[in-house]
């Protein structure tokens, strides 16, 4: 079992963000959709321990996020909506290399891995460019490179295409299909979920539909009508 | 903004190949020498050396100008004030000192990757461990500061545009409040992103 939610309840201030979510996610491609404020992002953040359940438990890679958040984060990559908030170093290659700092790798090995991942995601020509000179789409690809260079077992993406144009959205969708990792994507971008194995629909903190993309998105459209 | 945003210009000049620690030490020595040089003639000689170093680095005229451009009005004001209170010699010397020091610091930035600068700083700051400070945290702080300059600048531009769109461009509060709130939100998000990348013990 890769990701297990067991009767997860999250309360933030006076608001119940998630109300008794139970799900076992073993599929390779899992999508989560729902209205704004339905608890999607909180659900994603639970997976690598950025948020913790008020009650219930979340188990990822066999570990409880409450007790092993730091260890889980080494196996779970997280891509945020806004790439500007996750780029730490001034230049492209430096930001990707920064992810590997704690690995204790030789400089040549770091350079090789950085060059590999930048080439894979089409940023090789920008290696020495200042990160703030990149377009929004390129910044999101850089953020993805900085996550993927660590070769995580699970990748969580919180609305990865919200700030992207159509071309970069399609590029991210294409890359999603090629990734060997288990991927959990929270999104409003319904075409992104084409070909996914499973989609959950959240409404007011509860899972109200769970199934194939066609079934779940159909339910979501009715909910939003 | 070039100097502030760590705009490294890739190259293979002797200055690029010099270790970051040596460049930082050289910068400290050179700035001390600039303070000690008394006459405008000696400082003009130092200016020739700085120009030669830029030529040696092959970073280009535009990148070189971008280093001193942000202080041009400050230099003019400084020259004017010094002319009034210290005479022509004093005004020329003080202004040259400031401009040359900024140009030298910019040259180090242009020829040194931030990661190399961080490693050098970590080595320099390693004795800080004995008083409970983490050199990695200190060097990361520097790097995040450098990285945050364009982010906050972009935020300020967005807030300014929103102000103009609403016709309240003269209100300091209408500018400062969203800017501070946005900067704090960015800081929160950056902290969370660092945690997500495994740097959660900082």
Image: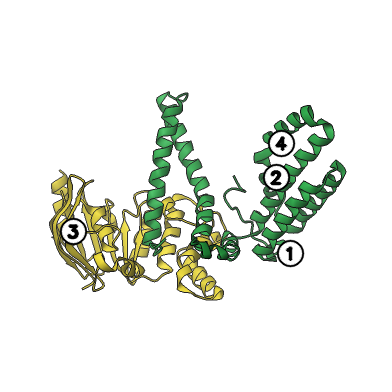
Chain colours: A yellow, B green
For the residue carrying disc 2, how many other residues have a C-alpha within 10 Å: few (<14), some (14-19), or many (20+)?
few
Q: CA distance from mark 4 to mark 2?
A: 14 Å
For residue B65, the mark is: 2
Residue B14: mark in rendering: 1
Closer to viewer: mark 3 or mark 4: 4
Q: Is residue A203 above or below residue B125?
A: above
- Output the chain of dot 2: B
* Residue A200 image label: 3
Q: Please tell me which of labels 1 and 2 falls first in the chain.
A: 1
Q: Is residue B101 left or right of residue B134?
A: right
Quadrant containing the N terminus of chain B in the rendered view = top right
Left of B50 or right of it: where is A212?
left
Q: Which residue is mark 4?
A: B75
Q: Secondary structure at mark 3?
A: strand
- Where residue B134 appears, as percent x and y from the top left, is 49, 62
Would residue A165 be visible to someone looking at this image? Answer: no
CA distance separating discs 1 and 3: 58 Å
Query: Of marks 4 and 1, which one's residue comes earlier in the chain?
Result: 1
Q: Nearer the viewer, mark 1 or mark 3?
A: 1
Of callouts 4 and 2, the N-terminal one = 2
């Amino acid at each position: 079992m890769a990701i297990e939610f067991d009767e997860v309840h999250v309360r933030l201030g006076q608001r119940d963000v998630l109300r008794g979510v139970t799900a076992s996610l073993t599929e390779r491609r899992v999508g989560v959709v729902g209205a704004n404020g339905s608890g999607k992002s909180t659900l994603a953040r639970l997976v690598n321990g950025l948020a913790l359940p008020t009650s219930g438990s979340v188990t990822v890679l066999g570990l409880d996020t409450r007790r092993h958040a730091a260890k889980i984060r080494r196996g779970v990559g997280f891509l945020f909506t806004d790439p500007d908030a996750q780029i730490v170093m001034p230049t492209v290659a430096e930001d990707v290399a920064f992810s590997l700092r704690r690995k204790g790798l030789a400089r040549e090995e770091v350079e090789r891995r950085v060059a590999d991942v930048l080439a894979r995601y089409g940023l090789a020509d920008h290696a020495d460019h200042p990160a703030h000179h990149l377009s929004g789409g390129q910044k999101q690809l850089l953020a993805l490179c900085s996550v993927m260079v660590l070769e995580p077992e699970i990748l969580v993406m919180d609305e990865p295409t919200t700030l992207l144009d159509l071309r970069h959205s399609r590029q991210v969708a294409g890359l999603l299909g090629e990734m060997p990792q288990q991927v959990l994507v929270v999104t409003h971008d319904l075409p992104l979920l084409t070909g996914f194995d499973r989609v959950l629909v959240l409404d007011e903190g509860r899972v109200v539909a769970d199934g194939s993309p066609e079934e779940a998105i159909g339910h979501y459209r009715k909910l939003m009508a | 903004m070039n100097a502030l945003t760590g705009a490294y210009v890739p190259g293979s000049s002797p200055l690029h190949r010099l270790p970051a620690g040596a460049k930082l030490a050289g910068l400290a020595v050179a700035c001390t020498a600039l303070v000690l040089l008394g006459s405008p003639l000696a400082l003009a000689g130092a200016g020739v050396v700085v120009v030669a170093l830029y030529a040696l680095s092959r970073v280009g005229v535009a990148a070189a100008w971008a280093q001193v451009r942000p202080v041009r009005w400050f230099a003019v004001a400084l020259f004017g004030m010094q002319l009034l209170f210290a005479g022509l010699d004093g005004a020329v010397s003080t202004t040259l000192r400031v401009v040359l020091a900024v140009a030298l610091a910019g040259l180090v930035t242009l020829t040194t990757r931030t990661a190399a600068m961080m490693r050098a700083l970590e080595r320099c700051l390693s004795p800080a461990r004995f008083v409970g400070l983490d050199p990695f945290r200190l060097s990361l702080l520097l790097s995040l500061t450098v990285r945050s300059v364009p982010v906050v600048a972009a935020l300020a531009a967005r807030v300014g545009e929103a102000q103009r769109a609403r016709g309240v461009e003269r209100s300091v509060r209408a500018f400062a409040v969203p800017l501070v709130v946005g900067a704090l939100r960015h800081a929160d998000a950056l902290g969370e992103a660092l945690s997500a990348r495994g740097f959660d013990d900082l």
